[in-house]
Image (cartoon, rainbow, N blue to C red):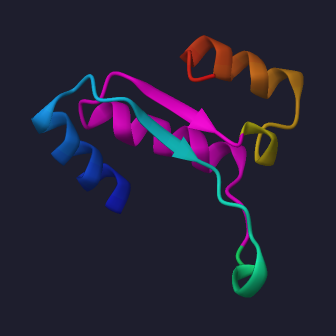
Amino acid sequence: MELRRFAKLLAQVDSTIPFIILAFFPEHKLIDVPSPNFQQMIEAYHAARDAGLKNIKLGNIGRFARTEKDYEILRELDVL
């Protein structure tokens, strides 16, 4: 996963660098590319954390969080 390699590089510089993972909005020529689902965003968060980053947030939450349970999980991870 490319995100993991990038996060590892950043963590080597400074593990407390703010790192925001934004959910993709399909628009214009990329309209056929789907937005990430909840599980994919959580996996991206864990990949960044496992690479050593400590200050990770998720953005464009409305694109992937659909239920109250989703929001509970995000609050527990402190990524809002």
Q: Is residue 62 above or below residue 17?
A: below
Q: Is residue 72 above or below residue 48?
A: above
33, 20: nearer the viewer: 20
Tell which of 62 and 48 is nearer to you: 62
Q: Is residue 65 visible?
A: yes
Q: Quadrant of the N terminus?
A: bottom left
Residue furthest to the bottom: 29
Residue 11 belongs to the span the image colors magenta: no
Q: Residue at x 24, y 54 (%)?
A: 5
How far from the left and from the top, in percent, is residue 77? Answer: 55, 18
Report the magenta residues as a range. Answer: 34-60
Farthest-out residue, left: 12
Above-or-below relation of 71 to 23: above
Q: How many marks?
A: 0
Residue at 11 percent of width and 37 percent of height: 12
Is residue 32 in view?
Answer: no
Comparing 78 with 1, the one in front is 78
Side (left or right) of 54 relative to 26: left
Q: Residue at x 63, y 22 (%)?
A: 80
Q: Is residue 68 left or right of residue 56?
A: right
Q: Is residue 56 left or right of residue 40?
A: left
Task: Classify residue 2 by image quadrant.
Answer: bottom left
Q: Position of residue 51 (x, y in %)?
A: 25, 37
Determine which quarter of the picture holds residue 75. top right
In the image, is residue 43 part of the stretch drawn in magenta?
yes
